[in-house]
């Protein structure tokens, strides 16, 4: 099969000669520059970014404070082993602990952080911590159908999409899945072998499916009664995206473990697993480790990202821009439903307006028209714009959607 593909130097090449493994389809566009809410491709064409690298560049592309912190750190110290102390990881962990607990009833309990490099690794750390905490025979992790927790073998099995499991059997044992928002079914599967329940506050990859009001509080009660950890996967929802610092803050429930990644470095790869200190104490030196986790460049970026997010009150920006975007979308005749919270939204397009096209078709047509977003299931697109979008960005994005869907 010959498919036009861009090689690393930007020249068109046959896909069979492409030096990258075909884990992604051939890209439609190659981006070479970004600033704020805008991206530019190799021909100099400008795009409006309503995806942020899938909920990553929340402060916009090339944010000067983050870029400055990375550049400054790069000239001083790029890497030493975690066998030694480094400058920023204590500070970033302290800020994360404060932000996580800021949404917990009564100020919550102090926690500790393990740094890694991605969302999957943050969840992998959480799963290992749950097994270490539970002890022999109490190791099962229960997660929701349609959830997404990563692509390593363990996080793939935690991911509640059985069609993704088949090609990679046998997967590590110790995972069960339940329908989302079904407390009776959770009650049925949580037995003495279960160490933890792992949930996203809003399922992102699964199609932007929120938790039902009251469900998380019921899960907390069940976990307390059965001595089971409640672990929140905030990889996509965390760090202001839903209009609160963390998605679970909307529910006024304090989990035992919180994982995050994506927005933490505004594009610099960094993940983190936070756990209440008495739970984190289950790990002893040597139980878990990573060469790069918490290294100076990544934590310099995270420190700058968190400082800017606090300064601009990123949760408030996400909430108010999300409200304005949602009401603008709901006013469109083609819009059947808007799901999600803050600036993590799925836009369902009515069957008449879709006229046989899929959400992915609409996303591809939007990219052609200069708007970056992604398909979400058969009839929806997902947006996760930078939290700094203004009214002009919202008007432009909605009018591109109008134009593409009318066409
Ligand atoms: C909720 C959630 N968990 C985990 C992951 C995996 O993160 P990563 O791709 O950084 O490994 C993702 C990625 O989309 C995610 O949305």
Image (tube, grey):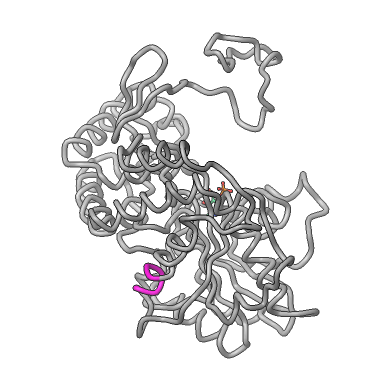
Hey, which residue is sitting farthest left in the picture? Answer: 391
Q: Which residues are magenta?
A: 98-102
Check the image and report above or below for 253 versus 374: below
Q: Residue 128 in magenta?
A: no
Q: Residue at x 44, y 78 (%)?
A: 254
Q: Is residue 327 left or right of residue 291?
A: left
Check the image and report above or below for 127 versus 77: below
Q: Quadrant of residue 42?
A: top left
Q: Residue at x 24, y 58 (%)?
A: 313
Q: Where residue 388 sits: x, y (%)?
A: 25, 44
Task: Pick the quarter of the image with the N terminus.
Answer: top right
Q: In this orientation, which residue lies closer to the viewer: 199 or 146?
A: 199
Q: Where residue 369 sits: x, y (%)?
A: 33, 22
Q: Residue at x 66, y 16 (%)?
A: 15
Check the image and report above or below for 193 versus 144: below
Hey, which residue is sitting farthest right in the picture? Answer: 170
Q: Is residue 55 left or right of residue 259?
A: left
| Main secondary structure type of the part rendered in magenta | helix
Q: Is residue 160 left or right of residue 199?
A: right
């Amino acid at each position: 099969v010959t498919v036009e593909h861009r090689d690393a130097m930007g020249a068109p090449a046959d896909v069979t000669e492409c030096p990258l493994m075909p884990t992604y389809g051939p890209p439609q566009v190659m981006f070479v520059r970004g600033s704020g809410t805008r991206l530019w491709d190799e021909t100099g064409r400008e795009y409006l970014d309503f995806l942020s690298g899938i909920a990553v560049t929340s402060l916009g592309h090339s944010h000067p404070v983050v870029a400055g912190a990375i550049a400054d750190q790069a000239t001083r110290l790029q890497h030493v082993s975690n066998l030694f102390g480094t400058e920023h990881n204590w500070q970033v962990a302290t800020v994360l602990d404060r932000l996580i607990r800021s949404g917990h009833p009564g100020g919550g309990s102090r926690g500790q952080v393990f740094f890694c490099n991605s969302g999957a690794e943050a969840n992998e750390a959480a799963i290992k911590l749950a097994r270490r905490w539970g002890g022999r025979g109490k190791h099962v992790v229960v997660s929701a159908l349609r959830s997404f927790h990563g692509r390593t073998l363990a996080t793939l099995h935690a991911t509640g999409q059985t069609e993704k499991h088949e090609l990679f059997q046998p997967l590590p044992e110790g995972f069960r899945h339940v329908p989302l928002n079904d407390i009776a079914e959770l009650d049925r599967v949580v037995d003495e072998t279960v160490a933890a329940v792992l949930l996203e506050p809003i399922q992102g990859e699964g199609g932007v499916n929120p938790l039902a009001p009251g469900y998380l509080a019921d899960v907390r009660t069940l976990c307390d009664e059965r001595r089971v950890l409640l672990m929140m996967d905030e990889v996509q929802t965390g760090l202001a995206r839903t209009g609160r610092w963390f998605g679970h803050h909307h529910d006024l429930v304090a989990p035992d473990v919180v994982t995050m990644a994506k927005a933490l470095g505004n594009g610099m790869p960094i993940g983190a697993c936070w756990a209440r200190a008495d739970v984190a104490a289950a790990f002893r030196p040597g139980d878990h480790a990573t060469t790069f986790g918490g290294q100076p460049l990544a934590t310099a970026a995270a420190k700058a990202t968190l400082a800017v997010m606090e300064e601009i009150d990123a949760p408030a920006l996400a909430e108010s821009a999300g409200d304005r975007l949602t009401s603008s979308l709901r006013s469109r005749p083609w819009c059947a439903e808007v799901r999600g919270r803050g600036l993590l939204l799925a836009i369902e397009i009515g069957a008449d307006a879709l006229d046989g096209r899929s959400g992915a078709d609409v996303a591809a047509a939007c990219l052609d028209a200069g708007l970056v977003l992604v398909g979400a299931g058969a009839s929806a697109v997902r947006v996760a714009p930078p939290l700094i979008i203004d009214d002009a960005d919202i008007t432009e994005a909605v009018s591109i959607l109008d134009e593409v869907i009318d066409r």
